[in-house]
Amino acid sequence: MATSSTSTVRPLQLAEVERISILGSESIVCGFHLVDFIWTDIFANLSRASTYVLITDTNLAALYLEKYKESFAVAWAHHQPEKPAPRLLVHVLPPGETSKSRATKGAIEDWMLEQRCTRDTLVVALGGGVIGDLVGFVAATFMRGVPFVQVPTSLLAMVDSSIGGKTAVDTPAGKNLIGAFWQPQRIFMDMAVLSTLPAREFSNGMAEVVKTAAIWTATEFDVLEEGAEDIRAAVLDGQREGTAGLTVASRTPAQALLLRVIAASARVKAHVVTHDERESGMRGLLNFGHTIGHAIEAVLAPQVLHGECVAVGCVLEAEVARRMGHLSPVAVARLARCLRAYGLPTAMDDPLLLKRAGAERMRALRPERLMRVMAVDKKTVGAQKRLVVLSSLGSTLEMKPTSVSDALIAEAVSVGVCVSPVSTQLHAEVTVVPPGSKSISNRALLLAALGQGQCRIRNLLHSDDTQVMLAALQALGACTVAWEDGGDTLLVTGNGGQLHRPDTALFLGNAGTAARFLSTTAVLVNAKDGNTVLTGNSRMKQRPIGPLVDALRANGCEIEYCEGEGSLPLRVAHSGSGLPGGHIQLAASVSSQYVSSILLCAPYAQQPVRLELVGGKVISQPYIDMTIAMMAQFGVHVERLAENEYMIPTGTYTNPTEYVVESDASSATYPLAFAAITGTQCTVPNIGSASLQGDARFAVDVLRPMGCTVTQTETSTTVAGPPRGQLHALPDIDMEPMTDAFLTAAALAAVATGSDGRVTRIRGIANQHVKECDRIAAMCAELARFGVEAENHPDGIDVHARPIAELKDMPSIHCYDDHRVAMSLSILACVAPGGAEIRERRCVGKTWPHWWDVLTRDLGVPLVGSDPEAEAVPASERSSSSASIVLIGMRGVGKTTLGRAAARALNLQFVDLDELLERETGQSIPEIINSDGWPAFRAHETRVLRTALTDSYRTGTVIACGGGVVESAENRSILRAHVSSHDGDAAVICLTPNMDHVAEYLGRDKTRPAYAVTSDIHEVYARRLPLYAESCNYEYLVDKALVSGTAGAGADSAWGLVEREFIRLVRFATRRDLNHVPLDRPSYFVSLTAPSVSEYLPSKLAAITAGAQAIEMRADLLLRHADFADVDLQSADVAAAFTAYVHAQFTLLRHNSRLPVVFTVRTEPQGGAFPSAADELRLKLLRSAIQWGAEYVDVEIDAGNSASSVMAARQNSLIIASYHDPSGKQLRWDSEFALEILARARSSGNIAKLISHASTWEDNLKCQQFVQQHHSASTPLIALNMGFAGQMSRILCPCLTPVTHPLLTAAAAPGQISVRQINQARSLMGLLPTQQFYLFGTPIQHSPSPAMHNAAFAALGLPHTYELKETPGVDELRSVIADPLFGGASVTIPHKQTIIPLLDELSPAAQRIGAVNTLVVSSENNGQTRKLLGDNTDYLGIMGCLRQAQMETRTPEFTSSSALVIGAGGTSRAALYALHALGIPKCALYNRTLEKAQALACEFESLFESLEVVDSLERAAEDICPSYIVGTIPASDLYLPEQLFAQPGVALDMAYKPRWTPLLEAANRRKWGVVHGVSVLIEQGIHQMELWTNAVAPAKCMGDAVLTKYNSEF
């Protein structure tokens, strides 16, 4: 109806806007709070419409829909009050990429037709890129095209997808493949909506903003580089309330900056679109970063966002431009730094990508796959790939993408690099300019920051280390910085030593120089309270800093270690006193950086510093001299009082106007060494005899004696090498003045055969043991890969040269993330006959990011990218979550006991929060409550909790909280923040109790205040239950009643199982062990069908799961339990009861199987038993399974948006996105519907699962074709047909095939078959060839191993055989193990050590034990490469048997016990390793031949706190009083004194003839637990079988087979 007056209508709030022209019309409108302006502009200036259709998604509808509807009415009332308002129709879609499909487009069009929309309809797209692309395509085709308006609500949509008229939908074949160009009549960019963006979405959009500036405008790039914090603040904090920014006058400076950068980016795109609307040339510039970025996105989406992938693509494509010689290294470094400032990843191994995508998906990010994706990129012309090549920041080589060779792109995306040998005909004379010195750069940055005034630093090293230093100095408020000359000059404005406390911990990565310099710098912070934390990566936390901390502490500074003693992280407390000064003594025999750290900061001490160096020979004196010389250049003169004593006056550094950083002398050794080793000539023009750096002497002191011609002036060095192969060895050289250069010298020494002696002995380099890695050990290990022997010494290395021709062909070199290892060995690779593969090429970024460019472009070395297979990394080097683990739950549930057990198992510290509170307050908790009341106690608790999780115990700790910690809303917020701050790596675990057990415990415990008289404990728990749920991200059910009596576990062993499974959950929650199944080979999960897991206990479950890799828990089938028959699942009480029952069943299953769990709630429409009406409960169960630690969670993808929501909450679980069509009528394998469902599954989960029904046998062929097209290990697909006719598809399913077992009462689905049936069928089809397994050794004729293993093969339906192969030596076995049918072997005496030379690789255990008892055959490259792995399962057999015996007896825990090993032969080695693995700290070793015991102890003593060799068993009883005894010698007449068994324990004898050995008889008499040797034989055999089959072994039938033979013969 018509509006007669506007007097009652609110006034319009019309924003002041900025307009941008595109295609001749000012169609882009930017401003703040535009809603009223949008409708007013549409009504006044666009084509009149009878119907307006606003399309948005559910997320945005909740935020903005009512505001837009209200504004529509108000704007029309002001526009034409006398006329009826036109129709406003609203259509709301589910959010996410899955809506961007042909099916959704069709549904929208059908709806519009139903609403009688005609050609005079105007469509408004309110949303991000998905809504804009989809709605634009609808507008382009509806009635052959209707006008539409874009209102982008995400930053990415504003600066990218909304501009240019590209519209499209996704198809199963790819993204945006069907669409049209259809220009919007308006694009309204309302900056105010960005305030609702999550921080990650802001970063996602900023990738496009930075990209645009990088290709177009250097000035705008400078603004982005310098204004990152202000721009972030304007977006994330500036628009939450009010109408600030509506007018120009009301805009804050941050808002004005935000509008500027977004408008500038939009203006560039508008200009490009105007000149190239259909993307024929110039518009291709907007694809900078997208060629590689889209390929990364194809692998990592949806977990990794478009902008995150493009950010990485931008850096990699910039590296290609640098490699081509068009872009400077400085520009690449600036681009990466700018992107990082906006929270974006910049490399393919960036930790951000790993956190988002997970390790498994990251493993799929292989160069070969990326190149395949790029081959079908729309920018590719024919077979020629095209990239946007930068010539500088703000300009491109061409005004269109440039053709680039595949080799250059492949190199950029590769993890490693293959260095080929240079021609012997090479006679180059080259000049190479290394980057700025890292040592000088770091010192110059610190000096200029502490100094007063401005200093322009030129030739600064752009590297990871200097970026860390610069960021830390800015965080401390030491200086402000600006880049000049295109990034070649850094303008530092120092604040004269005025430092403030940083807002967060200073993360220093692996930057040792920064860590040591900043440890003293942090002491200078001008604050009277608080502290500064310095931390780093896992390697930095191993590097020493103790002597520096000791010296500072002795001087009065308050510094404490947050984790391990002697290393970062450090906490520096501030009290206003700074650095006291005066006499400081410092031990300087480990690192000169300690000395430089104090020297550099000493002028700002309270009094002049007299620095005395003590504790032995001072290391690396030239670096100390460098520091003193540079301090003089900044106006502070150090007086040397004696050889090791310095006086530093107080004062302020005066910054020179300009400081030029010398090139890095350590880096200069590499091009000079290239000349030496290849017989060519190289000049480094800015390193000479006048250099501040000790490594400048390398050419004169090392290369000249090796036979090179060296010409050195004050400012340059030229080296000409002798003819190739004629370098001289150096019999003895002290490299203490240039320790970092020893790696280069060692690489040259490897081929220094041109003199009589061939051994180069390098000394004076002890500090190299504690650098980025143990460099001396690393060089010994990696030179060995070339075939060069090197000896590791405490202060040096001996290298035994080999002729070049005898070097091994193409070794694969592990660099230990150490730049100097990579660069030095790349020089050796230049002459090695086959070159070498450098596995980690990017580690050179620490000091010379463009080293590989120099090596190939300047030095002429052929390079290609490589993709090294993952290499086993020692446990000490593995990274896992260091975030502290927090335990919450009712008092009495076991937080302290379980927490201590987890801390022991994971080598973490344990803290009880209540005990910590009592220590800090000096009162017990009852005393606090009695004197001050509960509110005071809660206030103390909050303070202690916050300090623990944000400061003192943030990492490396298991923290047990009080039962009521969740009563405080602030505490709950702190716990949630702990989880979110570690981005999924932290665990807050709620221990769910059996309340009857808790009530019983609380009745006894008087150490804590009782609950109020009116409070029933069950009522308290009911009140806290939702508070616990709000605070935790994992949950563990603690109920011994579930364990006792169900799996053969008695009451004594029940708690041991509870602990074991809790530790497994902790490992899973912290990503230490995700327990996932390899998806590159067939695998199976058994689907349990009974309404209670207890029906399979105590013995059926092990048999049912034999041959499987996982086990499925069907929560829907648990509804068949009598307690839940015909119940209303929508009732809150029933839902809670059923959830508790499912949790108990899940826990019961966990206690009885180590297999990963597939948690499923199958609904009735998809062939299950769960009613569709109870969808809320279904989602609760799925999310709960994630919190319970299920490795896999099966989520149906057709049930609303549940799959995506569960995927978003998945933590460490993998989501199986499944679709089941029990009828087979919809899901046909050759239909487009199958492709659409697959695409939806891929976007909603980690693994796609599509299940149809076979009507004919041919349906299996179609299913198999579908699998062959769409399955890979990186994009896994479970696809099969149900029904009897579909059984063939189960046989051919590539991974995680659901199976049944004869012991199950029913199959979970029609047509399910067993593992045995599948293996038999695959064998008949030729998919599972027969393999031959053996026992190698002598004498072996009575061994029960053939009976054991052949029984297992038969039980699993495997066609393999196991035979005896008795030989006196191993030479006779060469032809056996070379046979293609050889599947593996057991190895016994006398071959356990002599077999090793025949193998390709040893497991870490076999390597440490020094003996092999199992051979495993593995294949790589799709079976093309075959490897023989040697392993040792003897120790696993010992461990397993001792664990079981410990649980069944009252024997003390391993970690608090001592053990005795009798014997010193090969089996003793396994016994010692097993005891170490169990955590036993103290051990004694007895052998009749004392010398053998002593030799063995020397090898293994590092594994124990104490490993003592005893000369008698009486002494063993006296000295250690063992709880565990392992006998490893055949039954003998040893005297076993009674006192040996004085306390409860377990005895294990490896001999199994006779059954009762003297050791076991003696132990049995003293009521000890005993383990017979035959039990160990069976246990280790089970482990062997599982290594060979990658599946659960049929343990019972194996044991029965052994015991049948054993009992008949002995």
Image (spheres, helix red, strand yellow):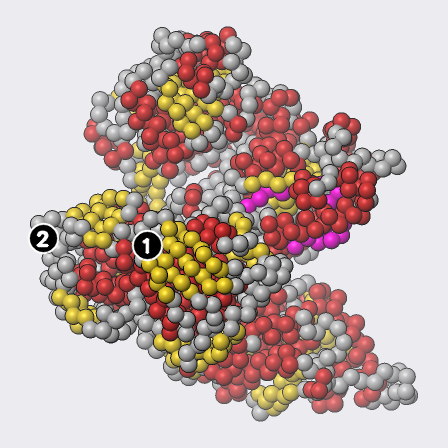
Whole-percent x and y of residue 1133?
81, 40
From which residue to which does the magenta span run?
Answer: 956-979
Instruction: Identify which residue, 1480 or 1242, lies in the foreground.
Output: 1480
- On screen, residue 1276 versus residue 980, left or right, reads left
Q: Residue furthest left?
A: 756
1159 left or right, relative to 1363:
right
Judge from the rendering whether residue 1091 lies leftward or rightward of residue 571; answer left or right: right
Instruction: Work out whether 202 lies above or below 1255.
Output: below
Say which label, 1 or 2, has the lower sequence index. 1
Residue tagged 1: 619
Determine which quarter of the picture holds residue 193. bottom right
| Circle 2 SS class | loop
Point out the frontmost of discs 1 and 2. Answer: 1
Any magenta on residue 978? Answer: yes
Image quarter where the N terminus lies is bottom right
Q: Could you classify mark 1 by the number of other residues whose Cα lies within 10 Å: few (under 14), some (14-19), or many (20 or more)?
A: many
